[in-house]
Image (cartoon, rainbow, N blue to C red):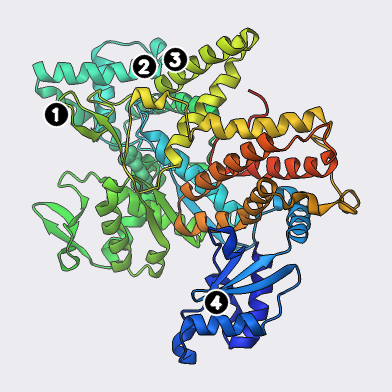
Amino acid sequence: MTTFKRDIARVIGPATGLDEAAIEGAITLPQHADQGNFSFPCFPLAKQLRKAPNLIAEELAKTLAPPAGFTRIEALSGYLNFFVDKADFARRVLSEVLLRGAAYGASDEGRGKRIVIDYSSPNMGKELAFHHLRGTMIGHSLSRVFARRGYAVERVNHLGDWGTSYGKLIVMFLREGMSPNELENLTIERLNGLYTSFSRAAEQDPTLEDQARQAFARLEAGDAEYYALWANFREVTLRELRRLYAILNVDFDAWVGEEFFANARHGKLQAALEVLESKKILVESQGAEVVDLEAFGMPPALIRKSDGSTLYITRDLAAALYRHEHYAFERCFYVVDNGQSLHFQQLFKVLELLGQEWHDRCEHVPFGLVLHKSEEGNWEKGKTRSGHSSLLKDVLEAARDKILAIMAEKNPEAAQKDGLALQIAVGALVFSELKNRRMNDIRFEWDQALSFEGDSGPYVQNAHVRLCSILRKAGRADKSISDKDLANLRWEIFADEESFAVLDLLAQFGDKVASAALSRDPCVLAQFVLSLADATHRFLHNSRVIGSPEENERLFLVRAAQSVLGQALEMIGVPAIESM
Ligand code: ARG
């Protein structure tokens, strides 16, 4: 795609004196066939040339010679519209997609640069709630997008594994007289149960909250027995997290939690506090140490409580300093819901006040909330503890079971396909989240989550499945393709509307990846996947492939569509399954 735009820019540049890169950037893809395949708006030229844009467009259309591979240039209401030679367009696009394979749509923009992406980062001791899926998958998708742009990506899970909630677990564990033996068989459900029984017991016995605080203080002070308990609780949670991440095909390069930045035994906290002290920006306020941010219209950043314990932001400060030193990042993204915007503004401001000139390379990538209906019927942020939020594993299982039931109805043998059903369930849930703009809130409703109609995961997966099954039948599934295979094809075969629509989208893949990176929003790719799935379904509906006189050529289009759709699906975390 970029090569087409570049060819156009090379023709417009010399005639107008405009910068060719700027021209490339201004070229758009028109919506209607009568506006050609690429458009250049002449409006910005009006001032410079002191002429009306439509006159400029008309003159240029008359004088410019179409670049190679284009048949004509037309002026329309201030736009210069370029029409491609469809056969040549097909040749260029298919050759590039098929010969470059997994490298098609990639770029080396990020060569030699590193990006840290902090995502998922759940609080430990609890199960993953459904709303955790969103940030997890946005971060996961962005990690793939930036890797494709040539960046070295470090995927970081900043686990919430420190804080008074661990004091609660310790208190309950000891109170219920659980033996070390039980520690070995401890499950995440049991841990959750400890939380619930703590809340219940604390209503009867108000001293429990204090006991929990004391237990956490003892843990912070380095008590070996408590630390062993803590490590166990963490491990139990991690086991369940890893199980779910494996289902989602999500992974991390570093699992470094808050404990690493808070616990004196790792030395990271002291380093951060020294920086804070040396810059003299800490002030005392009611016994606590804070950074005053009033001048910036923000509440103070509370760094250390009067009892000496640290806070979320303290740990994040230590983490940012550590990441900068450890990764020398070009960018550090925090994929965290927009409810934490103030926290990140404070964090970045404190880094700036500390003279860390790289503070502006840290970036909060916020996303809208997943809302659940409360008992009173209001839409509210999902909370795991108060119970009006569903667990991720429950939603996944319910979706899988429903899919299994649908499969069994259509094909009784398919009833055994548990694993496949789960992949379809993952696709359905992930797609329905990522097809929304990142900042939009979304409402979780069971009926809707389990409805697989319309613009759904199964619909886009099905387009991929159809392409795969044609390739299998034709024995072309894994065959490697070389220049020679593409010589002497009848490229004019692809000039029909449905084939051309697929090609047009394939050509846009690299631009879509670039735009997902720029907007930090996988939604761009999810929408692209949807368009490509639509175009694929339409093409297959209208054109017979196997057994048609055009079979040989069409199989190359099928292969190219499968390759790009498969890669795009994987980039948004929707499994590119090959049968269903
Ligand atoms: N554990 C936090 C939470 O669940 C999110 C952590 C995000 N990352 C960070 N570096 N603060 O709210």
Left or right of 70 on screen, residue 135: left
Residue that badge 1 annotates:
210
The numbered mark, 2 or 4, whose residue comes first in the sequence reads: 4
| Residue at the limit of the structure toward the top, as seen here | 412
Type of amino acid under label 3: Glu
- The amino acid marked with disc number 4 is Ala
Percent x, y of residue 150:
62, 57
Q: Nearer the viewer, mark 2 or mark 4?
A: 4
Find out if the beta carbon at label 1 lies less than 8 Å from the nearest ligand 1 atom.
Answer: no
Residue to which mark 4 is pinned = 22
Residue of label 2: 189
- Front label number (1 vs 2): 2
Q: Which mark, residue 184?
A: 3
Alpha carbon distance from label 4 to label 1: 63 Å
**Viewer-nearest of discs 4 and 3:** 4
- Residue 263 appears in view: no
User: In the structure shown, which secondary structural element does the residue marked by tag 3 occupy?
Assistant: helix
Do tag 3 and tag 1 residues touch (Cβ < 8 Å)?
no
Which of the two marks, 4 or 1, is nearer to us in this view?
4
* Residue at the image point whose x is 28% and y is 23% from the top: 170
Label 3 vs 2, first from the N-terminus? 3
Ranked by sequence position, the earlier of labels 3 and 1 is: 3
Mark toward the start of the polypeptide (4 vs 3): 4
Q: What is the crowding at mark 2: few (fewer than 14 residues within 10 Å), some, or many (at least 20)?
A: some
Closer-to-camera residue (30/380) = 30
Given residues 393 and 398, the one toward you in this image is: 398
